[in-house]
Image: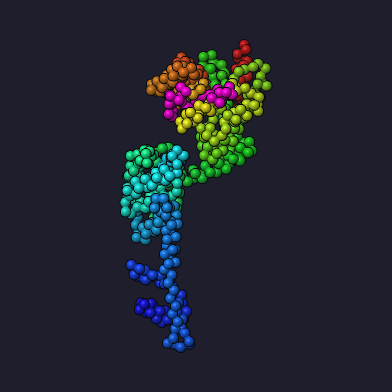
């Protein structure tokens, strides 16, 4: 209390007639927070009124509430808000000390975490998060900050001495946390994770560094390897976001068109059909490659209306060409179907509606699917493909050999055509390994009673070699580039004329 008296007299000596002040005692065992007010009393110089209100309980509640707001209740780590605040403070301290060190923010995302919740319940999911948190915490150093940003995503802040070399070592250290399976009750789960990072300096905004790390994490989830943020990725992300807006508008305005690349029967040289390929001529940017806009469509969900549009437009094209032909030609049009569309859309209804809307038989259309569409749920994929076969549609597996190539499910699925990727075909004459792969795929297709289509044929020599090896159909610039609807019909008409003479 003597300290309070001294403090009160100091306030009066400073000329503060009436004053309110919060003061925290230095008692380490039982610190108190007091609100002090003092004023002269009775008009004299030797009389004053001192009021002291103990605000300790309120202060403790305030501190506890803030701690709860900044902490993750499940793991005890700081949450996103707390992590960002602690990182801001750490970078400010580095700046204040005159340090020239860089720092890194490393993100760890537990792969397929939602499947754990779906399979064994949320309690097991929480147990897995706690186990992962303990393992990560055991591998951090005293000056590093570990937080859980939300869901199955963790973040680590670390100061660097030698830049990217340090980052690689830290990432290895964190990745090693999941080398051994996690034991959850009676379950043993091998945890895989996506790892990404971004680096910053004391002059950078840590919020930007975290955002850069999240951009890199998105790539890491796709590439299945560690990704370090590279300059220019923000511009790429912004462009993709802008493309999403423009693509949505383009679908509404009918700005996309289908081009058709001929498929040629290698045995007799006549036209077998066409592959329909989406093309987008942006009013300001010019032609946009499908390599750029298809991933944007898949990510945003626009792949569903885009895929349905392609099916409907291809079916209408078949009907238009049939009505223009004097002589019937039993050609087929192939339409690519994204694995994302298979997951999100009722694709049987989509194909059925397109065929009925154009009054075209299912045997006139081939649905091309990639191997990735079958990996997660082979049994479900078989049910779906059986339903598509019920519409009399033809089914082709695109880019065979470039991904998983699981022969077990290939034998079980009702696939009619295997498409051999251009990466094998284009180098057949100069690369004996690629030639051996093509031979193997052709032999496999024959054994399974499937036809084959080779993509990327650009020379007569490759065309002749594939014919000798027994490939059914060829596709590539040697025959024709993708053609507009009118040009493709002219190609069809010329083939019909040639076959009638």
Question: Is 219 displayed left or right of 303 in the figure?
Answer: left
Q: In the rendered view, would you say 379 is above or below 17?
A: above
Residue 408 colored in magenta in the image: yes
- The residue at the far top in this view is 501
Residue range (magenta)? 386-412
Image point 52% across, 37% down: which residue? 298
* Image x and y of residue 106, in percent: 39, 47
Q: Quadrant of residue 230 in the image? A: top left
* Image x and y of residue 243, in percent: 55, 41
* Image x and y of residue 121, in percent: 45, 41
Colour mode of the rendering? rainbow
Label count reads 0
Image point 35% across, 55% down: which residue? 100
* Image x and y of residue 477, in percent: 52, 24
> Is residue 149 something that shows in the picture?
yes
Q: In the rendered view, would you say 172 is above or below 324?
A: below
């Amino acid at each position: 209390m003597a300290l309070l008296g001294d403090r009160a007299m100091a306030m009066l000596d400073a000329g503060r007639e009436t004053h309110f002040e919060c003061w925290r005692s230095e008692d380490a065992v039982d610190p108190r927070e007091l609100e002090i007010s003092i004023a002269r009393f009775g008009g004299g110089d030797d009389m004053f009124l001192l009021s002291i209100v103990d605000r300790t309980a309120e202060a403790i509640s305030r501190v506890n509430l803030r701690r709860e707001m900044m902490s993750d209740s499940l793991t005890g780590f700081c949450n996103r808000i707390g992590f960002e605040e602690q990182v801001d403070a750490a970078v400010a301290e580095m700046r204040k000390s005159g340090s020239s060190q860089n720092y890194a923010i490393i993100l760890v995302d537990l792969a397929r975490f939602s499947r754990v919740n779906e399979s064994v319940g949320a309690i097991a999911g929480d147990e897995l998060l706690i186990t992962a948190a303990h393992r990560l915490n055991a591998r951090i150093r005293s000056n590093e900050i570990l937080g859980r940003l939300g869901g199955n995503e963790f973040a680590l802040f670390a100061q660097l001495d030698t830049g990217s070399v340090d980052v690689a070592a830290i990432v290895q250290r964190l990745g090693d946390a999941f080398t051994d399976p996690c034991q959850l009750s009676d379950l043993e789960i091998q945890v895989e994770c996506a790892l990404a990072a971004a680096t910053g300096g004391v002059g950078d905004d840590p919020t930007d560094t975290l955002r850069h790390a999240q951009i890199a994490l998105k790539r890491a989830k796709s590439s299945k390897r560690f990704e370090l943020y590279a300059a220019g990725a923000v511009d790429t992300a912004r462009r993709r976001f802008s493309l999403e807006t423009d693509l949505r508008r383009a679908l509404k305005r009918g700005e996309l068109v289908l081009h058709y690349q001929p498929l040629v029967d290698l045995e007799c040289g006549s036209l077998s059909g066409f592959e329909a390929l989406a093309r987008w001529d942006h009013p300001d940017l010019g032609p946009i490659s499908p390599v750029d806009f298809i991933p944007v469509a898949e990510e945003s969900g626009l792949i569903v209306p885009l895929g349905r549009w392609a099916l409907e437009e291809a079916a209408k094209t078949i009907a238009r060409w049939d009505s223009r032909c004097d002589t019937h030609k039993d050609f087929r049009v192939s339409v690519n179907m994204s694995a994302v569309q298979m997951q999100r859309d009722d694709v049987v209804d989509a194909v059925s509606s397109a065929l009925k809307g154009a009054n075209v038989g299912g045997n006139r259309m081939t649905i091309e699917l990639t191997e990735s569409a079958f990996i997660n749920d082979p049994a479900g994929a078989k049910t779906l493909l059986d339903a598509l076969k019920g519409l009399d549609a033809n089914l082709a597996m695109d880019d065979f050999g470039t991904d998983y190539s699981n022969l077990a499910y290939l034998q079980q699925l009702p696939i009619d055509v295997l498409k051999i990727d251009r990466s094998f075909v284009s180098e057949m004459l100069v690369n004996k390994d690629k030639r051996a792969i093509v031979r193997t795929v052709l032999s496999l297709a024959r054994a399974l009673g499937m036809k084959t289509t080779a993509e990327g044929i650009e020379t007569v020599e490759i065309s002749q070699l594939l014919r000798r090896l027994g490939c059914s159909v060829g596709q590539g610039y040697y025959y024709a580039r993708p053609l507009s609807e009118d040009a493709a019909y002219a190609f069809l008409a010329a083939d019909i004329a040639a076959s009638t003479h």
